[in-house]
Image: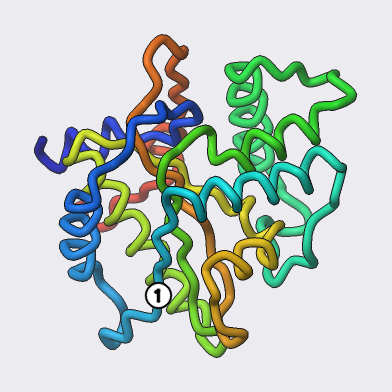
Amino acid sequence: MDVYEAVDSRRAVRAFSDEPVPKEVLVRVLNAATRAPSSGNLQPWHLYVVTGEPLAELKQRATGRALAGDPGDEREYPMYPDALSSPYRDRFFAAAAQRYEALGIERDDPDRPRRIAALNAEAFGASVVLFCYLDRTMGPGQWADAGMYVQTIMLLLRAEGLHSCPQVMWTNYRETVKRTVGAHDELVLFCGISVGFEKEGVPRLRTGRADMAETVSFIGG
């Protein structure tokens, strides 16, 4: 698979099979991902790979919190700005409606928030979840570096025939995650990344993207 195909076929999959991911594949991907760029070569990330029984227990605890209506742990960073203006707000709501309709959750379902939280807490059935942390002394530049690292991992996973779903949702249950991975207090959870093989027979969702002309300007020719 070349890089263009990897980029084009990467999407946030929300239905994974229970087929385990070979550890040697994860090692190969994560070893290659060490080449991801970072300003000053700080490589500010720390990744925990959770599988097997520890993951099953984590899912159980997080799902229990979700189904109980637990609002989650206090956020350590905002997921979105307080006030989204157009076109960002429009893109957000269009993608959200498309995403959860595909999961069979209607917009007017009174139990919608809990159902969404529970699906996320199950990592959509993934057999692997990666948890990416940063030292909390790091600044915006290093958070951008972590984003490039995560994207590098997701593209390498595609090259291995695997899919992924980045989930900032896990920050809502950061204390539960911390209990599982043993992260130190000086680390802040950036996101989780569910990893696995896509479940067969599930409708494939591909959210739209803005036309390049909306986000790119050519200067000088």
Q: Nearer the viewer, residue 115 or 80?
A: 115
The percent coordinates of residue 73 (x first, y second) are 78, 63
Residue sitting at x 59%, y 50% = 57
- At 68% from the left edge and 56% from the top edge, which residue is drawn? 80
Of 216 and 4, nearer the camera is 4
Q: Residues within 10 Å of mark 1 (few under 14, many from 20)?
A: many
Residue 58, x across and y down, in percent: 60, 52
- Residue name at image x 43 percent, y 78 percent: 142
Which quadrant of the structure image shows residue 76? Answer: bottom right
Label 1 sits on a secondary structure element that is: strand
Q: Quadrant of residue 198?
A: top left
User: Along the horizontal axis of the image, is 60 left or right of 53?
Assistant: right
> Does residue 54 lie above or below 36 as drawn?
above
Give the quarter of the figure containing the N terminus.
top left
Residue furthest out toward the front:
53
In this picture, is 110 found above or below 155?
A: above
Identify the residue at the far left of this view.
Answer: 2
